[in-house]
Image (cartoon, grey):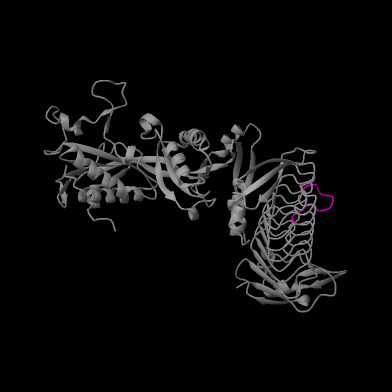
């Protein structure tokens, strides 16, 4: 059994929940966990003021439950262990994560997995803008690890991404892969507009036809089976995403670009009905 | 030498097969169809019967169904053995580069799934064939290389794990004539093939069993095993061909572990006996060749 923190009632202001990592909480007894400080708006509060602390400190897992809308930074910076969140949470979940497994059984706000360097972030619902992206002012976003989103993602998913996998079960908003260096963003429900602007070597994959062709900085190359993407889709399926066999077995159109950059990036678009 | 013992009507010499340590890799080759996966594996395991003449020994281990391959396509697992890690690494590059990458629709993966302690480069070196147009992806913690080829991309794992295996295990099957001996050897091979085992010779069977060195030349590393050549039985004073035996075949066994080779030998021994072999024995060099000794008398119990 894990340490379980259940929100007593909705906090009066946004809470920086970044101290609530499995490695930190499981190194303490329940009393000390309840005594940890958190920023709540302008105030500093104790964990025990906001949460009911339950469970046992027996393994490397931590569970958060209750109304978590105002909790930002859940699991950010975590390096190991398992953190499970039951409910929707605020911004920056798993941001800067370097290891471990963070599961959000609900939706997450903006900047989820931003600057992530390792580990696994699962979001069963939707994710907000800048999923796995670079923080404002930073050139490099996600540097490793895996993000799996069951629903849709907001604008600029994977912006500035350098390495890793972002797999989105639904649609990705406009501007996915903005100034992407490398890595892979897959949107099974399709990519939004202006995908891949400034992309150097990254891969953007759209499981549905684009409303309009890729931006003119890209050029069509060929249709092929995309063996690496197939492996990534199977990986996403293994991580819990529903991936149709037609996607793994089918043909993908490869558009190369962004030719205003290196031109070594690609947008792969699923060709429905083609084998 | 101890007295022979009987398995059914087959006389089994109470001796042992002697084997030595080798390094191995397990390659998983996948393709769009079973046929192309097999073609690639067949090509990659060609001319790999003996380290003496081929620098490596290799064989198809088993076909893999879609649910056992990394990319969900039909596949074949093959085992490649060499005496040391460096040599093994070069053979991997030669064979994957020339026989797998060239074969339509294939991809090549590490059959050890990154669990081996040591590894040798595969895609890390082969990527240069991409002439700068190659790209890599890290998927599930393992790096793969995408090498552009004429029909799309060849996907290959960056590294392949190296295991410590056993090479040179053997079983020698004899009968009164060539047809009977071959039938017994074929039955043995059928029983011996399986997970963790490579039988590197054609069809798993050797008809030109050798001895180390030569009676007449210092330049020859290996020459015919005259002691087991039936046509020389009346001519050479030290012939080991039993009376009534007109043909002998050897089955050489490489395995991923001592236990794998032992159980493989057991399966072969009993299958050969059941298929009409009149004599079964094994080759050794008095314990000087290697530390692994598979005593046939310890394999009397049939496989479970």
Relative vertical location of residue A36 with respect to residue A189 in this rendering, above or below: below
Q: Nearer the viewer, residue B294 or B227?
A: B227
Q: Is residue B131 inside the magenta stretch?
A: no
Q: What kind of secondary structure does the magenta stretch mostly adopt?
A: loop
Task: Between residue A246 and residue A266, name the one nearer to us.
Answer: A246
Nearer the observer, A226 or B77: A226
x, y percentage for residue B2?
16, 45
Determine whether B90 is above or below A1 in the image: above
Name the spot of residue A167 as percent of width and height, x first. Answer: 68, 56
User: Can you see residue B139?
Assistant: no
Q: Residue furthest front?
A: A273
Number of on-image labels: 0
Question: At which x and y percent is residue B210?
Answer: 27, 31
Q: Quadrant of residue B19?
A: top left
On-image quarter of the C terminus of chain B: bottom left
Residue B122 lies, with reference to residue A5, above or below; the image says above
Say left or right for B153 vs A64.
left
Q: Most extreme residue toward the right, as rendered?
A: A42
Residue A135 falls within the magenta-colored stretch:
yes
Residue B232 appears in view? yes
Up the image or down, B287 lies above or below B53; here it is below
Q: The N terminus of chain B appears in which quarter of the rendering? A: top left
- From the top left corner, tell me how far across and down residue A80 is, in percent: 65, 60
- Magenta segment, which residues? A131-140
Q: Please name the residue shown 65% across and 40% down the image.
A: B135
Q: Residue at coordinates 79% horizontally, 49% vertically from top-left?
A: A178
- Residue shown at 30%/48% (left/top)? B190
């Amino acid at each position: 059994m894990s340490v379980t923190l259940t929100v007593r009632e909705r906090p009066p202001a946004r809470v920086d929940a970044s101290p609530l990592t499995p490695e930190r909480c499981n190194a303490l007894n329940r009393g000390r966990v309840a005594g940890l400080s958190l920023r709540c708006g302008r105030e500093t509060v104790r964990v025990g003021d906001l949460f009911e602390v339950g469970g046992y400190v027996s393994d490397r897992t931590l569970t958060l439950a209750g109304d978590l809308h105002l909790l930002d930074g859940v699991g950010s910076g975590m390096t190991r262990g398992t953190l499970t969140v039951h409910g929707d949470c605020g911004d920056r979940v798993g941001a800067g994560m370097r290891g471990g497994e963070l599961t959000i059984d609900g939706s997450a706000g903006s900047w989820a997995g931003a600057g992530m360097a390792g580990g696994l972030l699962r979001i069963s619902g939707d994710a907000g803008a800048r999923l796995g992206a670079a923080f404002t002012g930073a050139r490099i976003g996600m540097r490793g690890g895996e993000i799996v989103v069951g629903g849709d993602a907001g604008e600029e998913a994977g912006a500035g991404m350098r390495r890793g996998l972002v797999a989105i079960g639904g649609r990705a908003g406009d501007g996915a892969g903005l100034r992407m260096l490398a890595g892979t963003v897959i949107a099974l429900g399709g990519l939004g507009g202006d995908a891949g602007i400034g992309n150097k070597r990254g891969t953007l994959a759209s499981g549905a036809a684009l409303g309009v062709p890729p931006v003119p900085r890209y050029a069509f190359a060929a249709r092929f089976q995309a063996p690496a993407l197939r492996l990534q889709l199977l990986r996403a399926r293994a991580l819990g995403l529903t991936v149709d066999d037609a996607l793994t077995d089918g043909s993908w159109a490869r558009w190369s670009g962004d030719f205003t950059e290196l031109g070594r990036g690609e947008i792969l678009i699923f060709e429905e009905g083609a084998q | 030498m101890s007295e022979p013992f009987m398995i059914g009507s087959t006389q089994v010499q109470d001796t042992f097969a002697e084997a030595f340590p080798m390094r191995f890799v397990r390659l998983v080759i996948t393709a769009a169809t079973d046929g192309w996966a097999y073609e690639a594996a067949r090509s990659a395991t060609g001319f790999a019967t003996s380290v003496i003449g081929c620098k490596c020994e290799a064989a198809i281990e088993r076909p893999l169904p879609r649910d056992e391959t990394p990319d969900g396509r039909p596949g074949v697992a093959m085992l490649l053995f060499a005496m040391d890690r460096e040599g093994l690494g070069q053979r991997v590059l030669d064979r994957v580069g020339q026989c797998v990458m060239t074969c339509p629709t294939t991809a090549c993966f590490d059959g050890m799934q990154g669990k081996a302690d040591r590894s040798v480069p595969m895609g890390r070196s082969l990527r240069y064939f991409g002439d700068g147009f190659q790209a890599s992806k890290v998927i599930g913690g393992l790096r793969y290389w995408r090498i552009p080829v004429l029909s799309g991309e060849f996907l290959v794992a960056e590294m392949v794990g190296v295991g410590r295996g056993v090479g040179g295990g053997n079983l020698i099957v004899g009968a009164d004539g060539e047809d009977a001996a071959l039938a017994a050897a074929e039955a043995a091979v059928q029983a011996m093939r399986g997970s963790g085992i490579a039988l590197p010779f054609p069809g798993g069977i050797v008809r030109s069993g050798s001895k180390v060195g030569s009676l007449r030349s210092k330049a020859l590393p290996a020459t015919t095993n005259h002691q087991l050549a039936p046509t020389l039985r009346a001519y050479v004073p030290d012939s080991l061909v039993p009376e009534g035996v007109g043909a002998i075949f050897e089955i050489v066994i490489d395995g991923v572990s001592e236990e794998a080779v032992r159980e493989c030998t057991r399966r072969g021994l009993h299958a050969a006996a059941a298929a009409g072999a009149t004599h079964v024995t094994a080759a050794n060099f008095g314990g000087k060749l290697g530390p692994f000794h598979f005593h046939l008398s310890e394999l009397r119990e049939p496989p479970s």
